[in-house]
Image (cartoon, helix red, strand yellow):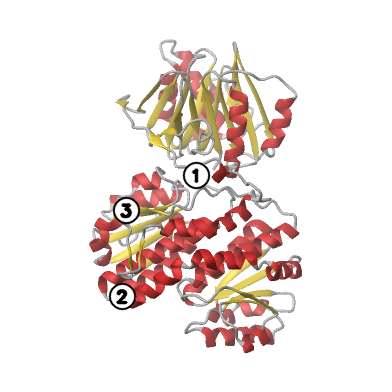
Amino acid sequence: MCGITGYIGNRNATPILLKGLKRLEYRGYDSSGIAILDTDRIKYLKKAGKIKELQALISKTSIYGSIGIAHTRWATHGSPNDSNSHPHLNESGTIALVHNGIIENYEAIKETLIRKGVIFQSETDTEVLVHLISAIYYEDKKLSFEDAVRAALQEVVGAYGIVALCKDEPENLVAARMGSPLVLGVGENEYFLASDASPIVGYTRNVIYLDDGEIVSLTKNTHNISTLKSKEILTKTLTEIDLTIDEIEKGEFPHFMLKEIHDQTHSITNTMRGRLNFQDGTTNLGGISEFIPSLINASRIYITACGTSWHAGLIGKHLIETYAQVPVHVEYASEFRYRKAIIDSDTILIAISQSGETADTLAAIKKAKELGALTLGICNVVGSSIARETDGGIYTHAGPEIGVASTKAFTSQVTVLTMLALMLGRKIEVAKNKGQNLISSLSELNKDVEEILKNQKKIKEVAKFTKDVNHYIYLGRGINFPVALEGALKLKEISYIHAEGYPAAEMKHGPIALIDENMPVVVLAPMDNTFSKILANIQEVKARKGIIITITDTKNSELEKLSDFILYVPPTHQHVFPITSSVILQLLAYEIAVLKNCEIDQPRNLAKSVTVE
């Protein structure tokens, strides 16, 4: 959550920081703020609301300097208002700090500081930290600002990514990380700090990813990275960002979400590039090749994830068990980390995360490693925490995803899991021709998505007809039940319509009580071995006057007769249908949200990367 950025160099920091905040706004948009060291004092402005509110404020004043920090907030402690916005300053206004994360023991520290006479201006845990740093720094005149930050961080419990500056050391910028991501961009006589690489790519492609327990002290010409506790100086190699400006701009699209839905014509292909082996009917996944025997012989596999990635994991469970015959358990990372799971040296944990920074998923990985499990990651961001923490893994190569509601990241995750399942299956007993059939359908996905995107008229009709309803139900069987869950989540996230996904056969065990003439029911009906059962489920809804919206890959007269709307996807393999049908569901949620004038890329109360528990 929250986006932080910092700059030190020879340029005016203000426009650099503001542009950085816009790149990071998907991480939080409750409020924002900026602090600049301007000659002999820190000037700061902060404002509740979107970043445009801060920009309007800045346009009315002069705030200039070559060292500064900025923040866009997703509220944890304290409501979104001006006072709780970052940066936070000490009482004398000589130290400013921005923070992503949660200080768990802030109340105890706050009580101690209040007894010393500190007066607080906000409800946040972050303000406690800046006052603690100030107390340490000014009580011991021998300490450098870096050492004061280091000492303060020894006293806090929790997660943080921080950047701080001090008027008394005007050539210095200090940052530290524990559980919340920080990237250091290395330019020529200048440095950039950010929660991810997107604000940095326009200035330099050379970055250093800070690890937990590290602190960096910057001047415009030098950087010094060391461990927080032991002060051991670290030498870290530069990484080149594989990212372009075009990838993080909307281009001709009105919303990032729509752009990213359209990106799936190539993002899925990018996920598969160099990994499909049609001749042998298998796939090649180099990042986990050495772990294939362990996966095949595992006593159990856990897939752990959050939100949309959890839905991808449910599809992965179906595929891996079908092709590889290995038992798979899918766990919410937030629950897995707190329960006594059955884990031993024959257990494998597969963690899925778009950002590679999801706090609960990272905690689940660490728990599994401590108990002796092999850990593998599926993520989209090269150099992310999950990529570095796991023993091996697979990158999705979907490209940056800015819209909060995940689209192309989800389909790329499902594509990776499909390739993984097939690779394992071919090592055991899946016949080559079956592998070739699946690969043939996978290789047609870009054309299938293009065809879906060309035929949006019917989707818009459904959106127009149902935009004013209060509830939606999504039904699917087998591998398509998680697709129903994902479709419902997309609708909830961006249109604020209550929606639920169910296994189609379970509808009669409760949810059928909700069906009436005002209830749209989306039914996933591929031509597979469940088709006749799905028809029966549709008839049950029809008998209760529900609005039936069918997604299918086949022409069928009975289906057409029963359905109020039919949305077609190109005929494909039954294990590829979850991907093509998901594109339809993404577009449906998008079109409804457009008609309702919702904030599509930045839906209320949500942030893209959940880096706090």
Q: Mark 3 falls on what kind of element?
A: helix
Q: Is residue 259 above or below residue 168?
A: below
Q: Residue at x 62, y 37 (%)?
A: 22
- Numbered mark located on residue 612 in the image: 1
Residue 347 image point, x, y percent: 28, 61
Of 196 and 248, the residue lying toward us: 248
Q: Mark 1 falls on what kind of element?
A: loop
Q: Residue at x 55, y 48 (%)?
A: 608
- Viewer can see residue 119: no
Label 2 or label 3, whichever lies nearer to me, is 2
Image quadrant in which you'd find residue 517: bottom right
Point out the residue furthest to the front here: 279
Neighbour class for label 1 at 10 Å: few (<14), some, many (≥20)? some
Neighbour class for label 2 at 10 Å: few (<14), some, many (≥20)? some
Residue 518 image point, x, y percent: 74, 75
Q: What residue does disc 2 label?
A: 432
Q: Is residue 408 left or right of residue 240?
A: right
Q: Residue at x 45, y 18 (%)?
A: 145
Label 1 or label 2, whichever lies nearer to me, is 2
Image quadrant in which you'd find residue 551: bottom right
Q: Is residue 114 above or below residue 245?
A: above
Residue 1 image point, x, y percent: 54, 43
Gap between marks 1 and 3 measured at Cα: 28 Å
Gap between marks 2 and 3 measured at Cα: 23 Å
Task: Name the residue type under label 2.
Answer: Lys
Ranked by sequence position, the earlier of labels 1 and 3 is 3
Q: What residue does disc 3 label?
A: 287
